[in-house]
Amino acid sequence: MKKVLVVLVMMGMLVCGCGANSGTDTENTGTGNSSKTSSITEEDLNEVWDSAKEYYEGIEPLEEEVTIRYGDGVGYQLSVPIYIAWKSGALEELGVNLEWVPSSSGPLRVEAIAADEIDLFGSGFAGIAIGCAQGTVKMLSYINDDSVVQKFYVKEDDPLASADYNEGGFKGTEEDWQGREVYMQSGSTLQYLMGYSLEKLGMSLQDITPVYMDQPNVSSAMLAGKGETWGVWNFQCYDETLEEQGFVPVIEGDDVGIQLVTGYGTSEKAWNDEQKRAGIEKILEAHYATLDWMQASEENMEHAATALTYWGETEGTAVAYEANLQYLKETHYYSLEENQEFFTKTVDNDYGTMYQALDMMMETMDFYIEQGNYQESDREYMIEHQNELFTSEGLDYVQSVR
């Protein structure tokens, strides 16, 4: 196992919007079993679960029940498919006893997988990158592109709010951004989004005035009107009260072209355990069945938004149903076919030949290496050990039984 000297620094700094995660990775750490009340009725929920369970009927249950400890946060789009499979009772019927282990970030989940405290995790870029750099994870499948929940806002009376969009896909010119005070979390995917966007204007982070703080403090400063520009992610990007309070988005991740993967990962130990592996493969099978259900109709996507709304309300991260529906509709979930390409086909780039799944991380890695969060040796390690870090075996299993 590779030992990375900078990993303790990265654990503290590199917090991602994945998951959520995030990866988003700064998240509520509930377990989905909170006693907080919800506006969603039991009848509404049963309608959701009954609708979804039709898509699990063709899945063969395990011959022997297995417990899988799953590390994740709550209420994020990367977690929705596995949450629905779990709460609908489908996983239990398939012989998988899922124990949801709450965790506040992807890097902490990687720490837990290395300590054999969990068997499977969902994470955004931060957890995936740290796990690959350490050599402690085996990535099984990408879940979704997290760029849709990465945004920078200004107040509506700020001249930047009414500025034209530039060729890079965001508002303002070099003059508008020069010296601008920007509140964001250091080492986060929002910092990457800002650096990536400025580069399109021939600028860098050195040309603005970054104010670095933890994400909750960024949100507090924003709502208090302290500062000029604020970076937010996840639920806050869909908070309808932001518009009511006069906030206007000026940079949006999906508009400028960044790609921020989230994914499922496991450990070598869990994957080599015959029972654990069978349970994890069954979870992957249920994940793709849930996606099939969600994307089969508008009604099903509305059902998924109902489940997400219930989840958030009972865990203290309440977001309006309409915002959750938009959140899910705008999220691109990677299909089984896309993932099979990512995890089996190779490409040649400036750093050598690698799986597409690893190539999808390289541009973001460029930024973090430049910022000092990673070293070039971390990238070299990922490339050299990519066959151990990325496997298509779980995807191949799902394809074989569909």
Image (spheres, helix red, strand yellow):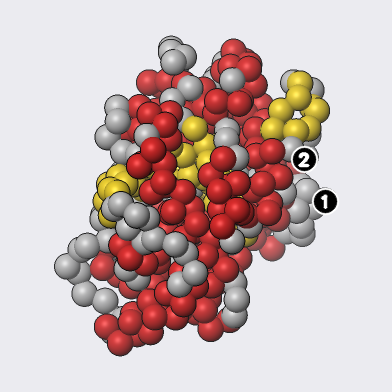
Q: Is residue 177 visible?
A: no
Q: Which residue is mark 2?
A: 200
Q: Is residue 268 visible?
A: yes
The relative height of residue 193 versus residue 319 in the rendered view (above or below) is above
Q: Residue drawn at (63%, 57%), measured in percent from left and top? A: 335
Q: Earlier in the sequence, mark 2 or mark 1?
A: 1
Q: Which residue is mark 1?
A: 167
Whether the residues at callouts 2 and 1 have beta carbons within 8 Å, the answer is: yes
Q: Residue drawn at (55%, 48%), measured in percent from left and top? A: 397
Which quadrant of the structure image shows residue 401?
Answer: bottom right
Relative to the observer, which residue lies in front, 203 or 330?
A: 330
Image location of residue 359, percent across then percent down: 70, 33
Q: Residue drawn at (71%, 45%), measured in percent from left and top? A: 341
Q: Amino acid at mark 2?
A: Lys
Quadrant showing the N terminus: top left
Which quadrant of the structure image shows residue 248?
Answer: bottom right
Mark 2 secondary-structure assignment: loop
Image location of residue 191, percent across then percent down: 56, 38
Q: CA distance from mark 2 to mark 1?
A: 8 Å
Question: Is 332 on the left-hand or right-hand side of 132?
Answer: right
**Other residues around mark 2 within 10 Å, as few (<14) / some (14–19) / many (≥20):** some
Q: Amino acid at mark 1?
A: Glu
Image location of residue 208, percent across then percent down: 62, 35
Relative to the observer, which residue lies in front, 364 or 162?
A: 364
The relative height of residue 209 versus residue 338 in the rendered view (above or below) is above
